[in-house]
């Protein structure tokens, strides 16, 4: 069970679907999770994922998350998981588990992760920072690369 919850957390944090295509039951569960998770819930998921990723030694120096905050976020997200799976989406969860197993569950949570992160990435402040990347790239080198690949203008 602990491994399944961790895998669901990773799927949510990454918002990336597994190699296999989602089945009808995991697709239904994914839709239900998105409907069931309020904007506040989605923000909590994103903060939790950010807090977890900030524990990595390569990025830890850029964050001020404490262990106590991470524990509290785990508790909050645990309660959200419980509510979504056992109350809001109970019928869909049972069907996904029964017919598609743990992989179906992971795929369902990746849908919620994608939606939650899309909301984060769509914020004007985040978009402004991300758009700054265009100023840091040599456009002529990218255009030359596109011409060499036979797709001129593809990397504008």
Image (cartoon, rainbow, N blue to C red):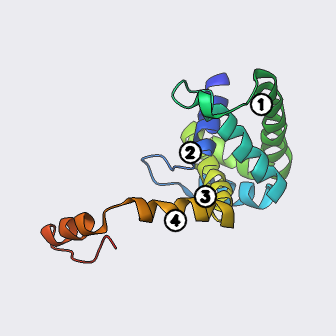
Q: Which residue is mark 1?
A: 74
Of the image marks 4 and 1, the number of the one nearer the N terminus: 1
Please tell me whether residue 8 is drawn above or below residue 148 in the rendered image: above
Image quadrant in which you'd find residue 85: top right
Q: Position of residue 153 (x, y in %)?
A: 27, 77
Image quadrant where residue 77 sits: top right
Give the answer, above or below, for where 56 lies relative to 121. Answer: above
What residue is disc 3 on?
Answer: 27
The CA distance from mark 1 to mark 3 is 25 Å
Q: Secondary structure at mark 4?
A: helix
User: Which residue bears the numbered disc 2?
Assistant: 14
Residue found 72% across the figure and 38% down from its top: 48
Marks 1 and 2 sit apart, C-alpha to C-alpha, by 16 Å
Q: Is residue 11 above or below residue 25?
A: above
Q: Secondary structure at mark 1?
A: helix
Within-10-Å neighbours for mark 4: few <14, some 14–19, many 20+: few
CA–CA distance in space, label 4 to label 3: 32 Å
Reading the image, the residue beneath label 4 is 131
The residue under the point 21% across, 74% down is 151
Q: Earlier in the sequence, mark 2 or mark 4?
A: 2
The image quadrant that residue 99 belongs to is top right
Give the mark, 1 or 2, whose residue is nearer the N terminus: 2
Q: Nearer the viewer, residue 52 or 77?
A: 52
Foreground residue, 2 or 99? 2
Determine whether, in the image, residue 19 is placed left or right of residue 60.
left
Q: Camera-side residue: 89 or 45?
A: 45
Q: Closer to the observer: label 2 or label 4?
A: 4
Q: Can residue 46 be spotted in the picture?
A: yes
Q: Are marks 1 and 3 in contact (CB under 8 Å)?
A: no
Other residues around mark 3 within 10 Å, as few (<14) / some (14–19) / many (≥20)? many
Q: Residue furthest bottom?
A: 153
């Amino acid at each position: 069970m602990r491994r399944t919850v961790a895998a669901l957390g990773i799927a949510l944090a990454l918002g990336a679907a597994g190699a296999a295509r989602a089945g009808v039951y995991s697709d239904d569960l994914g839709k239900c999770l998105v409907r069931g998770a309020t904007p506040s819930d989605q923000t909590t998921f994103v903060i939790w994922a950010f807090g977890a990723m900030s524990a990595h030694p390569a990025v830890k120096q850029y964050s001020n998350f404490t262990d106590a905050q991470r524990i509290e976020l785990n508790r909050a997200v645990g309660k959200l998981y419980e509510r979504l799976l056992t109350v809001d989406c109970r019928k869909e969860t049972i069907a996904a588990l029964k017919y598609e197993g743990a992989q179906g569950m992971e795929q369902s949570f990746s849908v919620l992760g994608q939606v939650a992160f899309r909301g984060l990435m769509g914020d004007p402040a985040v978009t402004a920072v991300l758009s700054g990347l265009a100023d840091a790239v040599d456009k002529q080198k990218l255009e030359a690369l596109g011409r060499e690949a036979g797709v001129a203008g593809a990397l504008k």
